[in-house]
Image (cartoon, rainbow, N blue to C red):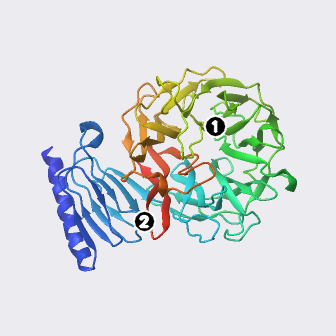
Amino acid sequence: MYRSYRVAMRTLLAVALVLVVAGSAGAATIQGTKRGERIAGTPRADGILARGGADRITAGAGDDRIAVQYDGAVDTVACGLGRDVVNADLADRVISDCEVVSRRLSRDIYRNADSRHETQVEPDSFTFGRTTVAVFQTGRRFQGAATNIAFATSTDNGATWRGGEFPGITKLAPRPGTSERASDPVVSYDALHGVWLASSLAVSQPTRLTINRSPDGLRWSGPIDAASATADEGIAYDKQWLACDNSTTSPFRGRCYLAYSDFVRGGLSLQNSTDGGLTWSQPVSIAPLSLVGAFPAIQPDGTLVIVYRTGTRDREELDAVRSRDGGSTLDAPVRVSPIDAFALSGLRLPVLPSVDVDPSGRIWVTWHDCRLRRSCLGNDVVVSSSTDGLEWTAPRRITNGATAAIPAIAADPASGKLAILYYAIRPGGIDAELVESRNAGATWGKPQRLSAQTMQRAWSPDTTLGRMLADYISVTYAAGRPLAVWALASEPAGGELRQAIFATKL
């Protein structure tokens, strides 16, 4: 304990010298107290010395929660004792005594009149080796979709990031394309062919499912159409998802799958590529009553399992369908679980499954649901799992308290640890939180808060379905640790919103 105190004091003294220099250049100097508190930076280059603060989760007292993001200045932050939460820009200097640090990956650069700026929503991410690629909408529009799709890439396990906007999809993209707007970005990696693939829903006439390819997650090709509807079909597809078979024990290694809601065929469609996304097979389809959120997962033996939401307004459920021949055919669907979700007025929070496979081949699915509460007045994060995609465990509640929404799950491919990222919604606002299981789902730890400042509903862009942080968010494992990618809405300034994509390495 005494050694930890001495290390902390040396860190604070070193930062104090930095603050003196920064102060001489017109920076703001902010000092906290020995209590846990929330500290907000200024639009200038801040020097923040948070000092004390007990661990908010384990001791019941407040952490220091420090928000210095989105000001464009280079801030310096030291946290001191306690478990502290920091939201910062990429260029900010955050001392190593700050335990939970989220970095802003990007910001909406567009200024077109038919989008709400500055807004970014709906991130997906994938990690392979030391590289993580995140993709997301930028410049959200009220009527749906966004001005373009953007990306951010780390090649050092989430320590640093670079990014930009995808070329060729929309009319305002670099190397402009033909579509008015784009939505539903997802990303995966094909290890056999050594290529990153990012899929987007390009919304115009015709509707297209596009694929941008990259050798390194930084340099991207123009889009390839995996699917394209005719001009008179309207919005023909929705909520596509992408997965590649990278298992060395699979007979289908190097095959990538694209699953989506197909309004032309009236159900779920699946396509595959065996050449790194250059060409795609004709769709294989099944026709449930309706579906959304088709999420493919691949077991080590090459079995593909797709989980999706289906049913009617009065009776919804999660179903799963298997393919054991590389996507050539689909087995009959089976039920995973009924769905009973509490709808929060004014917020866009669809019930979509998130799925991953652990090293043993067990498939894990999470969603938000109210059916395990005495009264359906709030949602919990629940999980179910299966070894074969046919028999599924009864849903188990992971959170209990605040209403939870749009959880994302990840399994560590090395250890089998599990992480779930979600939004917690309370009367005072919205926070991003993460829980982890270090024993393959047997028990779960306490929630870790990621947002330094609680988000208010009015800080997010409005849509036809309510205020939107995201329809989905994402978490993966990088070097054995959860790497969360999520949308953070900061307090608006100058008449513009301040919603951007952040990453947290825990």
**Where's residue 82, x and y in %?**
23, 47
505 or 205, nearer to the observer: 205
Alpha carbon of mark 1 to alpha carbon of mark 2: how far?
43 Å
Which of the 4 image quadrants contains residue 66? bottom left
Q: Residue at x 55, y 20 (%)?
A: 394
Read off the residue under disc 2: 70
Number of numbered discs present? Answer: 2
**Where's residue 91, x and y in %?**
40, 67
Q: Secondary structure at mark 1?
A: loop
Q: Residue at x 47, y 57 (%)?
A: 459
Label 1 or label 2, whichever comes before in sequence order: 2
**Where's residue 340, x and y in %?**
58, 28
Neighbours of disc 1 within 10 Å: few (<14), some (14-19), many (20+):
some
Which of the 4 image quadrants contains residue 298? top right
Which of the 4 image quadrants contains residue 217? bottom right
Above/below status of 258 relative to 159 = above
306 or 215, nearer to the observer: 306
Q: Secondary structure at mark 2?
A: loop
Quadrant (top left/top right/bottom left/bottom right) for the N terminus: top left
Q: Is residue 303 left or right of residue 421?
A: right
Above/below status of 149 relative to 226 = below
- The disc placed on residue 248 is 1
Q: Is residue 235 left or right of residue 440?
A: right
Q: Amino acid at mark 2?
A: Tyr
Q: Is residue 295 left or right of residue 224?
A: left
**Where's residue 460, x and y in %?**
51, 56
Q: Is residue 412 left or right of residue 238?
A: left
